[in-house]
Image (cartoon, helix red, strand yellow):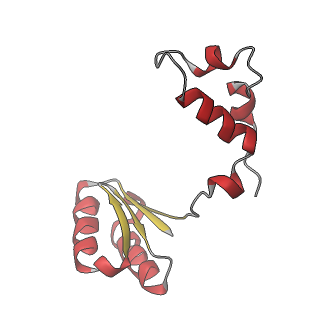
Amino acid sequence: MLLIVAYSRAARQALRNSCSTHAEAVIRRFGRAVLLCETEYGAFVACRLRERFGTAVEVARTEPLNEYRDVPEHVRDAAAAYEARESPSTPYAKFAAGRGLPEPDAMRETPLAD
């Protein structure tokens, strides 16, 4: 997928117009950001916006996150346990202490495997 982020008011308006005109290329809209199909046409729309607005438009190639393929099981288990906690106001670091769950600092420093 292609992620397009518009920073200026004019770029945001042009992005909205492009999404309306080229709806077949749009996967999802998020206000100032849009996901486009990773096709030549999606790239054409992105490049047009970038050409017109320069650095006021950012374009990035993204890949969907498959939590079962891309996220280690211990991280998924920690997320499930944390969401099932009894007290919703308990911060994760306090919740994880003494439970054998990954430490937040360790998770912050560990990249996901490619």
Question: Going 41% across and 73% down the picture, which residue do you hit?
Answer: 46
Q: Quadrant of residue 110?
A: top right
Total numbered circles: 0
> Where does the C terminus fall, quadrant-wise?
bottom right
From this view, report whether residue 59 is shown above or below residue 104: below
Residue 56 shown left or right of residue 98 in the figure = left
Q: Name the one closer to the observer, 60 or 39.
A: 39
Residue 106's spot in the image, x, y percent?
A: 75, 29
Of residues 73 and 104, the one nearer the viewer is 73
Name the residue: 50% across, 77% down: 38
Percent position of residue 63, x then y? 58, 64
Q: Position of residue 74 (x, y in %)?
A: 74, 38
Q: Depth check: give the residue in front, 77 or 57.
A: 77
- Most extreme residue toward the bottom is 40
Q: Quadrant of residue 14?
A: bottom left
Q: Quadrant of residue 27?
A: bottom left
Residue at x 58% of width, y 27% of height:
82
Say above or below: 20 vs 72.
below
Q: Position of residue 56 (x, y in %)?
A: 37, 58
Q: Is residue 90 left or right of residue 53?
A: right
Q: Is residue 111 left or right of residue 13?
A: right
